Image (cartoon, grey):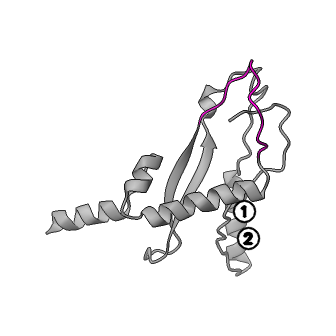
Amino acid sequence: MSYALQVAEEMDSFEPTTYQEAISYLGVDEWMMAMTEEIESLQKNQTWDLVVLPESRWVLGCKLVFKKKSWSSTKEVICYKACLVAKGYSQKEGVDYNEIFSPVVWYTSISVLLFLTETMDMELEQLDVKTSFLHGRLEENILM
């Protein structure tokens, strides 16, 4: 009995690693909706232009990353997320990029925020952002 419950729980928390797994999984409708939302968001935010591939260039691969997120400790509400990402490991320095940097939050900033929230008897709420984009402009053309 406990083994059956463990297997059922593992199936419920299953996150596909490929598109094929996502469309063959029991929650195919949820994963399809997540993929549709991601593509619609990318189109709405005009994140790319459709171009003809120049002869001297190659295309970076991409893949969908799938995640389940729950917003309560009881896991009553589960959101299915799909994110289209470039396979950046295949980029070449000087061709696809010149420098690397990543905007990250400092843990000190989070600590200060939590400290102020507690000290000033405030409430802290979590916000789910469907898609977020950096407002920087790339100097290089990335073909994906």
- Point out the stretch of residues depicted in magenta: 48-61
Instruction: Tell me, yes or no, whether the highlighted magenta stretch contains residue 103.
Output: no
Q: Are marks 1 and 2 in contact (CB under 8 Å)?
A: yes
Task: Please rate how many residues cluster around mark 1, counting C-alpha atoms within 10 Å: few if below 14, some from 14 to 19, many from 20.
Answer: few
Q: Position of residue 106 (x, y in %)?
A: 70, 50
Task: Please rate how many residues cluster around mark 2, counting C-alpha atoms within 10 Å: few if below 14, some from 14 to 19, many from 20.
Answer: few
Q: Which residue is mark 1?
A: 112
Q: Closer to the camera, 51 or 68?
A: 51
Residue located 65% across and 55% down the image: 39
Q: Position of residue 97 (x, y in %)?
A: 76, 27
Under mark 1, the amino acid is: Val
Pick the quarter of the image with the C terminus: top right
- Label 2, secondary structure: give it: helix
Residue located 43% across and 62% down the image: 28
- Give the answer, above or below, for where 100 lies relative to 29: above
Question: Tag on residue 116?
Answer: 2
Q: Closer to the camera, 14 or 36?
A: 36
Pick the quarter of the image with the N terminus: bottom left
Under mark 2, the amino acid is: Leu
Give the image quarter of residue 15: bottom left
30 sits left or right of 116 in the view: left
